[in-house]
Image (cartoon, rainbow, N blue to C red):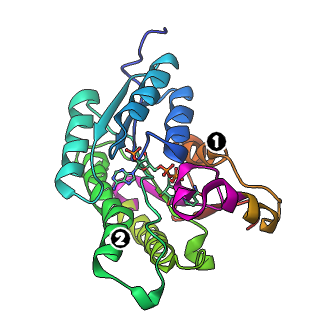
Amino acid sequence: MNTPKKEAPLAVVTGGSRGIGRAIALALAHEGWNVCISYLSNAAAAEEVLAQIRQAGQQGLAVKADMASQDDVRQLFAQAQQTFGRIDALVNNAGVIGALRSIFDADQAHLRGVFDANVLGCFYCAGEAARLMSTQKGGHGGAIVNMSSVASRTGGMPQEAHYAASKGAVDSLTLALAKELAPHGIRVNAVRPGLIETEIHETHGGQATLAKLAPTVPMARVGQAEEVASVVSFLCGAGSSYIHGTLIDVSGGR
Ligand code: NAP
């Protein structure tokens, strides 16, 4: 194993234990970042990602933190700051689709579950990260990348209005934070994936649904998590230094 690089920048990747977040954490590690990942319940998956971060020669930290809990999010950033002494990027990736639900069956607990994880979690994390990165508060600036979805502009799949609307909120949050945080030296962008092959689709048919929908994508295939991760790591790094307040679709033309 290579010697860990203490001077490396630190990225916090929420939901970095599986799927797109896992690919982002590994892409960043391979580009020289130390990475703090958060997860909800699958500690074994988080440990596997940590091992791969270390294999890439970087330092890693995994913190169990429910994005729906502001206390958990505060703990996540406190641990990251305590361990690494700096935060240079936040990837607000964690998210859920939630059970399929027609508007005729709109239900407060169901809606709150999705919006707490997908929207309020982004607010909580952005607030903690901004406080630590702000050049006006003693930090040295940084980047925030929010994980939206093309569902924010297509309306999403049938019976997923809750999900599409939550990602619409992520788009709006991105545009608003870009204005608010520019004077603090923090760039804010969002990535909007299309159909990406991960376990998130298990709530609505999994591989069978992906296979059925693939021909409807102009590129006639679903995407891979790594194809989203490469764009996110670009948005975290110096190569995107003048990209700000932008929503980038990674969707095969969908
Ligand atoms: P995934 O494979 O289901 O992975 C979700 C990750 O988020 C896991 O690490 C999970 O932790 C974590 N997580 C879920 N709920 C959480 C919560 N309340 N608090 C903290 N962590 C939580 O999902 P994915 O497909 O990679 O999706 C990642 C992001 O991309 C989501 O925001 C999703 O909406 C967005 N997206 C995905 C697609 C797609 O086609 N896959 C398309 C557009 C947008 P555990 O491992 O502990 O469960």
Q: Amino acid at mark 2?
A: Phe
* Magenta segment boundaries in residue numbering: 182-210
Badge 2 local density, few (<14 within 10 Å), some, or many (20+)? many
Image coords of residue 146 (percent x, y): 46, 58
For residue 205: magenta? Answer: yes
Quick one: SS at disc 1? helix
Between 229 and 179, the residue placed more toward the observer is 229
Residue ID at (54%, 50%): 199
Between 14 and 111, the residue placed more toward the observer is 111
Residue on which the image places disc 1: 226
- Mark 2: is the Cβ under 8 angstroms from ligand 1? no
Badge 1 local density, few (<14 within 10 Å), some, or many (20+)? some
Judged left or right of residue 149, residue 80 is left
Residue on which the image places disc 2: 115
- Sequence-earlier tag: 1 or 2: 2
Residue ID at (50%, 23%): 52
